[in-house]
Amino acid sequence: MRILLFLLVLPLCSLAQTAVKSPGVNANFSINGAVTGLPDSTMVFLTHPGNKQILATDYVKNGKFKLFGNVETPDIYHLSFIGYKDVREVFLDKNKLTVSGSVKDLTRLKFTGPGTQNDYQLYQTRFDPIKTKLNNLVSKINQTAAGPSRDTMIQAFEKSKQAVLTLVDAFVKEKPASPVSPFIIYITSPVSSDISELERRYNMLKPEGKSGFYANEVLKMIEASKVGSVGTMAPDFVQADTANNPIALSSFKGKYVLVDFWASWCGPCRMENPAVVNAYNAFKDKNFTILGVSLDQNRDKWLQAIKVDNLKWHHVSDLKYWQNAAAQLYHISGIPANMLLDPTGKIIARNLRGEQLYSTLQQILN
């Protein structure tokens, strides 16, 4: 829970990697500042919190300054002043802004002008109260011993999480083209593990809202969740076979292929092997084969298990245990596991066991 609240309280701007260019004569943004109480010659600068690069600088004169430069895509930057620890966040895009306020409270400097900063300030207004509520609630939960009182607080926490998602839906619906919308979808994604809901929110965005760092990160999360799912094309991989020759999954296109994840040390896998052997022997002459992917570490034990269990099909492994690259690619978290590919390389079934494996192949191949 501590991690969840950290993600909610701190906008994950530190992860973004917006390119920074020299302002030159073609600056596409500017910020005119007027902050009372700032001594002359105080250095003012904009930095990207992720890569720490300085985007623009100026020196205060009579309480005023001007920052200008280039941004590739809208992103969060920090407005800072040498000698002062407080910073002000600005969601910067290709626009002209003004900022005003007092040195007595730099965190409350006011930005005005067109652009995404207005949407970001709206986000802060709507989300800050519930973020504070969640933060306080989790602090209490972490300090409370297990029992009815803690259980009640946890239930309240779950309800508050749903309230966050309701706010996300409302904001995205209201501003589907704003760069702030994918930012909000991204930073609140840990609140729910439902990828279908994440995809639904992403699809609410207009085309212009689907560009930039945050939208791309959300899309990556969605695409990663679909790797290996039924109905998708199986991503290719290459691993060494028992003779140390590279074998690509794609080399089996044109056949029905059962990709079988197993290991010599896996008891349930070894118990399942007779059923896999039975299926292989029954359908190997009907455009069907098997590619065994082992999560072994010990080469000798891997080869011995293949021989003892009479597994007479192609086998590959990188001998990296749970870090096997193919297993990582397909998000394999337990074995035995398998997926059945059609001749085009599309996954048409997963985790077929025993009689179900045989009957499925019989239905497809007979």
Image (tube, rainbow, N blue to C red):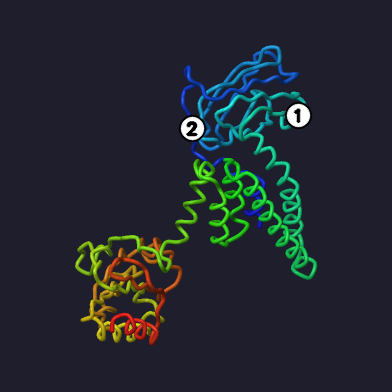
Q: Is residue 33 left or right of residue 337?
A: right
- Residue at 51% across, 30% down: 71
Relative to 169, is 289 above or below?
A: below
Residue ID at (70%, 41%): 124
Between 199 and 11, the residue placed more toward the observer is 199
Give the number of callouts: 2
Question: Within 10 angstroms of label 1, few (less than 14), some, or many (20 or more) residues?
Answer: few
User: Is 26 or 292 nearer to us in this picture?
Assistant: 26
Pointers 1 and 2 in contact (CB under 8 A)?
no
Q: Please determine whether, in this image, residue 225 is positioned above or below residue 99.
A: below
Q: Which mark is residue 50?
A: none
The location of residue 231, given as percent across then percent down, is: 40, 67
Q: Secondary structure at mark 1?
A: helix
Return the mark for residue 72. 2
Query: Between tags 1 and 2, which lies in front?
Result: 2
N-terminal of the two: label 1 or label 2? Answer: 2
User: Is disc 2 surrounded by few (<14), some (14 to 19) or many (20+) residues within 10 Å?
Assistant: few
Residue 37: x %, y % from top left: 75, 18
Q: Residue at x 70, y 12 (%)?
A: 62
Within the image, what quadrant is residue 120 found in? top right
Residue 155 drawn above or below residue 34: below
* Residue 310 placement (x, y as % from top left): 25, 83
| Quadrant of image for the N terminus | bottom right
CA gap between label 1 and label 2 equals 30 Å
Quarter of the rendering containing residue 81: top right
> Which residue is depicted at the point 60% across and 42% down?
180
Q: Which residue is mark 1?
A: 105
- In what quadrant of the picture does the C terminus appear? bottom left
Q: Is residue 121 left or right of residue 75?
A: right
